[in-house]
Structures are given as structure tokens and as C-alpha cells.
Image: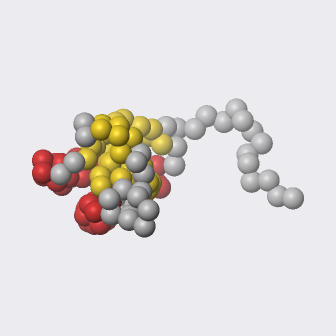
Amino acid sequence: MSNDAPTDTSTQHTLHPLKKVEIIVRGEKEDFVRDLLDDVGVSGYTIHREVAGRGEHGFHEGRLLFNDRTGLVMFFAVGQESVIQTIVDGLTPLFEKSSGVMFVSDTQVVRLDKFLGEDRKET
């Protein structure tokens, strides 16, 4: 049986500072957010559907039966500050007229190359 886990646990790994954006919108806005993330060149993102929680408009259940468009969707993306700022700028008008929230925070990653677009990778 092969074990890909490293055996030396004393190795120090370099942590690289980046920004993380978390976006929660109604399912009907999922395509808009996904298109924006693709257009700004973020290297990847994660989508969680059927998000439930409580906010300004009260408690919101996950997806309603057979209706993906009214449930809440959460996106996670990590990137350089300039890319995350472009996402913030692109989504701010949406949040001025639609419900949803966006959080931006500092984060650190070990594998920097996985979070930079092809044209931004360090050599």
C-alpha cells in the first residue's frame, strides 16, 4: 500500500500571504458571481449550495424543494489583493440592489502556485 504523506514532520513550509473572499448570494445570482470570478482571472473557487443562516432578513433555509434559484449559495476564492479588490468592485453594485454579503480577510497558503493565474506565477 502506497502512502503519499511525507514522513518528515519537522519540515518548515513557507506561508504566502493572500486575500480570501467569501460571498453569499441567492441562487438566482450564482451565474453572475461565477461569471465575474471567471472574468477577473481568479485561479479557482469553491461553491457551497444549500447554505442556511440568519441575517438581516431573518432565518433562511437551505434549498427549497426542487428550486435551486431561491436557496443561498456561498463562494470562496483566494487570490492576490488586486484580484480580490476587482471582485469587490464588481460585486458592490449587486449588493446595493440585492441581498447578499461579502467578507474579505487575510489568509496564508502553502502552495502559492495553486492560487495565482498562469500569467501571475512567480518564478
Q: Residue 50: x and y, percent?
A: 44, 54
> Quadrant where the N terminus lies?
bottom right
- Would residue 38 be seen by someone viewing this image from the given angle? yes
* Residue extending farthest front: 65
- Against 39, residue 99 (above or below) is above
**Colour pattern of the rendering:** secondary structure
- The residue at 24%/52% (across/down) is 87
Q: Nearer the viewer, residue 57 or 79?
A: 57
Q: Where does residue 71 sit, x and y in percent of width and height?
A: 36, 56
Q: Nearer the viewer, residue 24 or 57?
A: 57
Residue 63 falls left or right of residue 9: left
Q: Which quarter of the rendered picture does the C terminus lie within?
A: bottom left
Total tally of numbered discs in the picture: 0
Can residue 41 be seen here? The reply is: no
Q: Is 96 drawn above or below residue 36 in the view shown?
A: above
Taking depth in this image into account, of 59 and 73 the one nearest to the observer is: 59
- Classify residue 104 by image quadrant: top left
Picture residue at 41% right of the left edge, 37% below the top: 107
Kindly indicate the quadrant of the structure image that contains residue 101.
Answer: top left
Task: Indicate left or right for 26 with 97 as reference.
Answer: right
* Residue farthest toward the right in the current orientation of the protein: 1
Residue under the image location 75 percent in, 39 percent down:
8
Report x, y in % for residue 2. Answer: 82, 58
Task: Estimate the x, y position of residue 62 in percent, counting from the top left.
Answer: 42, 51
